[in-house]
Image (tube, rainbow, N blue to C red):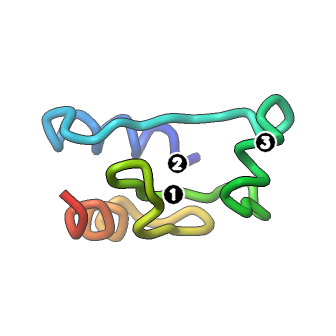
Amino acid sequence: MLEPVLEELGQEFNYKIKIVKIDVNDNQHTVSKYGVISMSILLIMKDGEVVDQSVGNKPKEELTKLISKHI
């Protein structure tokens, strides 16, 4: 459910952000590395480090604010 909203946000931010979706079943190392325990998690990363996160489906406006804090 987040994917279409995140694609819109990528365009609205003029591609200053990169959206990456991973399959948790095929990327167990990454899941373990970042402590992912929920299927709908958004990790905000800057310079290779997690700087914020959001769990669950959130409204576009809330995600916009979250991402804006880190650009």
Residue type of the residue flagged with mark 3: His
Q: Are marks 2 and 3 in contact (CB under 8 Å)?
A: no
> Residue sitting at 52 percent across and 48 percent down?
2
Residue at image mark 2: 2
> Residue sitting at 82 percent across and 29 percent down?
26
Q: Are marks 1 and 3 in contact (CB under 8 Å)?
A: no
Q: Position of residue 56 (x, y in %)?
A: 62, 65
Location of residue 9 by image quarter: top left
The answer to whether residue 17 is above or below residue 57 is above
Mark 1 vs 3, N-terminal side: 3
Residue at image mark 3: 29
> Residue sitting at 58 percent across and 46 percent down?
1
The answer to whether residue 47 is above or below residue 15 is below
Residue type of the residue flagged with mark 2: Leu
Q: Secondary structure at mark 2?
A: helix
Q: Compare residues 66 and 62 and report the one nearer the observer.
A: 66
